[in-house]
Amino acid sequence: MSLAPALYAKAPTTTPAPAPASAFACGPAALAPREREALQHIAAGRTYVQTARRMGLSKHTVDAYLRRIRAKLGISNTAELTRLAVSLGL
């Protein structure tokens, strides 16, 4: 039995790994108007408390909006949130 044919056989092709989820995987349109507004305030450098006061909400609601944005768009930190806001023109 010869191993030569096995050595020259084509290796099975594998499909490439899926690309990581980008900020636009779900699309910025997936954001609710109040989520977009909260994102705009945070991107402008406001704290959660300042954002809450301007929007007439509690800081916990602002935190919930931003957690939802992160979950929807696969974002993990405030810097990425700010970059997203800039790219959206907020």
Image (cartoon, rainbow, N blue to C red):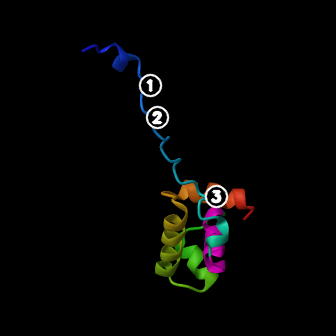
* Magenta extent: 32-43
Residue 9: where, in percent of width, then height?
A: 41, 22
Q: Quadrant of the N terminus?
A: top left
Residue 85 vertical position relative to residue 9 in the rendered view, above or below: below
Q: Amino acid at mark 2?
A: Thr
| Label 2, label 3: how far apart the Cα atoms are | 36 Å
Label located before the other in sequence (1 or 3):
1
Where, by quadrant of the figure, is residue 73 drawn?
bottom right
Q: Most extreme residue toward the bottom, as rendered?
A: 56
- Label disc, if present, on residue 84 of the rendered structure: 3
Residue at x 42% of width, y 33% of height: 12
Q: Name the residue nearer the viewer: 89 or 1.
A: 1
How many badges with numbers are in the image? Answer: 3
Mark closer to the observer (2, 3): 2
Residue 81 falls within the magenta-colored stretch: no
Disc 2 to disc 1: CB gap under 8 Å: yes
Residue at x 67% of width, y 70% of height: 29
Q: Main secondary structure of the magenta part?
A: helix
Q: Which residue is mark 1?
A: 10
Q: Amino acid at mark 1?
A: Lys
Residue 10 vertical position relative to residue 70 in the rendered view, above or below: above
- Label disc, if present, on residue 13 of the rendered structure: 2
At numbered mark 1, what does the secondary structure look like: helix, strand or loop?
Answer: loop
Residue 65 vertical position relative to residue 77 in the rendered view, above or below: below
Residue 33 falls within the magenta-colored stretch: yes
| Label 2, label 1: how far apart the Cα atoms are | 8 Å
Residue 21 vertical position relative to residue 40 in the rendered view, above or below: above
At numbered mark 3, what does the secondary structure look like: helix, strand or loop?
Answer: helix
At numbered mark 2, what does the secondary structure look like: helix, strand or loop?
Answer: loop
Residue at x 48% of width, y 76% of height: 64
